[in-house]
Image: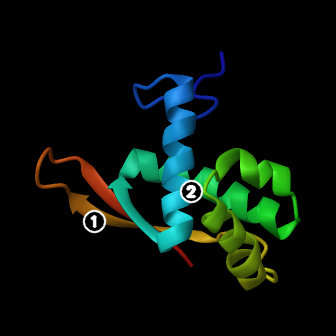
Amino acid sequence: MIRNLGARKLSRTGSHRRAMFSNMATSLLLHEKVETTLPKAKELVKVAERVIADAKNNRRIEVRRVIKDKAVYHKVFDVIAPRYKERAGGFTRILKLGARRGDAAEAALVKLV
């Protein structure tokens, strides 16, 4: 029996997860860093890497499905995709920040390389 296929559910519905990661990816691409919990950071990296790879290959519709903000959409194609033109992958980095003060959740910083 094969287990643990797919992504983390993070105690959310599918539509909530898609919306959350769309918003987080938009914030990451706008500010070039975002602080969140470690499980969310690991899932966010998958989404952001896919968006940047699609932008590099000029797949505008696939990027538009994730990035809803027009300014960030243009930034992805005008600034971020040319920056990583020669890079094959690994556009993001996760830095562990330790336990968060309020609830002791493992915090992480996701930033563009």
**Residue nearer the viewer, 64 or 6:** 64
CA gap, disc 1 to disc 2? 16 Å
Side of 56 where 49 appears, left or right:
left
Q: Quadrant of the N terminus?
A: top right
Give the percent coordinates (x, y) of residue 7.
Answer: 58, 35
**Looking at the rendered structure, which numbered label has been put on residue 40?**
none
Nearest the viewer among 5 and 14 is 14
When the figure is inspected, residue 29 is found, relative to residue 64, above or below; the finding is below
Q: Residue at x 60, y 57 (%)?
A: 69
Mark 2 sits on what residue? 45
Q: Could you tell me the amino acid type at mark 1? A: Leu
What residue is disc 1 on? 97
In this rendering, does residue 8 appear at all? no
Find residue 110 and report its horizontal and vertical position in percent.
Answer: 45, 65
Q: Image point 76% across, 72% down: which residue?
A: 77
Q: Residue at x 55, y 58 (%)?
A: 26
**Image side of residue 2 versus residue 34, left or right:** right
User: Which circle's residue, 1 or 2, is located before the other in the chain?
Assistant: 2
Q: Quadrant of the C terminus?
A: bottom right
Examine the image and state in which quarter residue 75 appears.
Answer: bottom right
Q: Secondary structure at mark 1?
A: strand
The quadrant in which residue 10 appears is top left
Of the residues shown, which amino acid type is indicated by label 2?
Val
Q: Secondary structure at mark 2?
A: helix
